[in-house]
Image (cartoon, rainbow, N blue to C red):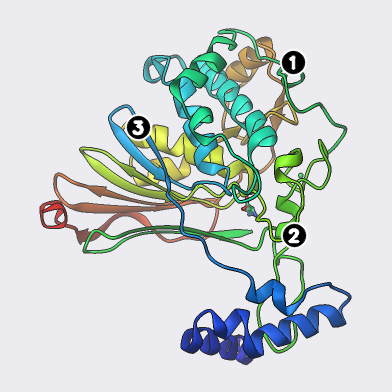
Amino acid sequence: MRNPDYARTLERLASEGFDGFYRGDTARTLVDGVRAAGGIWSLDDLSGYSIIEREPIRISHRGYRIVTAPPPSSGGVALAQVLQIIAGFDYAVLPRVERVHLLAEAMRRAYRDRAIYLGDPEFVPVPVAMLTSADYAAGLRAGIHPRRATPSELLPGVGAFDGSEDTTHFSIIDTRGNLVSATQTLNLPYGNGFVVEGTGFLLNNEMDDFSVKPGVPNAFGLVGEDANAIEPGKRPLSSMTPSFLMGADRVAVIGTPGGSRIITMVALGLLELMQGASADEVVAMPRFHHQHLPDQLSAEPDAFSPEEAGRLREMGHEIDARERGWGNMQLVIWNLANGEVQAGSDPRWEGVGSGSTGERVDAEAVFR
Ligand code: DON
């Protein structure tokens, strides 16, 4: 496919940096094209944009360090909450059904807090320290019944609603030990399906990542309140969870697309990594997901045996059995002891990474 408009857009960006996109020809073409199609963009909207470098969220769990996305993604905070809640249990030795129940309850509570507290930190005070603290997690953990699902509507916070439901991730480790975990998103496949003539690229529909009205779900069924309401200049709340896992034995780079399910995919993947699973095992592992509302435990076709599903239903979980899997996880693991690097690319999609890459990264040289 030839896309000369996009080539010129990229050339302007490469030669002029910020000004080659947010000002000048590209900006004017964008604003004219969007306004001609009925949109309301202005040149000031583009020139006033700036990238903000933020401190990542850092989590400690079972001897590993995890470095992940801060607000305005909800990924890192929700991931920290899930891990903090389950840290109070001997998670690794629990039988599978209890483990799924515990994780689903932790996910439910983290997504409830996402809906209430999380939004662009330039606009709303996001209580990151409180939400990710051990004391707060202990309070949430105390409300989990070991054998019963807590109906989401019984948790204080966002009310129930009457409602309904592609992105790219790169995980990279280079031979010098540099780590990149990058999730890029247009939100829904093909964004809003609109290319401004002369630019060669699709515009996103990230407005859907805002909460348009309290309690009204977005395309991924996520609800929110004022913290993530639409305001001029505000960044929408994401679920992207590009993450690094750093332990004494291995370092991993992990991430995936998948909308609201990104956080729980990364959480499940990290838990398996910390148990020693290989890259291929982690990306192929069957997934389940709970996001508070809708009050359902979503399951990939092979996530639960009929017996496990039966027991989870007895505990009060409504199982949303999906016909298809979700996600497109990309994972690289670096074994610090022998320098071996393994890649895993989600078998649900078309990636090619599998098993050892044949590269070695000398940990001693990198960390010296
Ligand atoms: O940032 C977010 O949370 C969404 N815009 C991500 C959307 C997504 O992953 C869709 N891909 N499957």
**Residue at left offset 52%, top offset 20%:** 136
Which amino acid is tagged 1? Leu
Residue under circle 2?
232
Q: Secondary structure at mark 1?
A: helix
Looking at the picture, how far across and down is residue 232, in whole percent? 75, 59
Give the label on residue 154, or none. 1
Ligand 1 within 8 Å of disc 2? The answer is no
In-front residue for pair 291/138: 138
**Residue at left offset 76%, top offset 47%:** 229
Residue neighbourhood size for the residue with mark 1, other residues' Cα within 10 Å, grouped as few (<14), some (14–19), many (≥20): few
Q: CA distance from mark 2 to mark 1?
A: 34 Å
Q: Secondary structure at mark 3?
A: strand
The picture quadrant where one finds residue 143 is: top right
Residue 146, above or below 308: above
Q: Secondary structure at mark 2?
A: loop
Looking at the picture, how far across and down is residue 310, in whole percent? 65, 15
Looking at the picture, how far across and down is residue 132, in whole percent? 48, 30
Q: CA distance from mark 2 to mark 3?
A: 36 Å
In-front residue for pair 9/277: 9
Who comes first in sequence, dot 2 or dot 1? Answer: 1
Which amino acid is tagged 2? Pro
Ligand 1 within 8 Å of disc 1? The answer is no
Res 298 seen here? no
Residue 261, above or below 32: above
In-front residue for pair 251/301: 251
**Residue at left offset 74%, top offset 15%:** 154
Give the label on residue 60, or none. 3
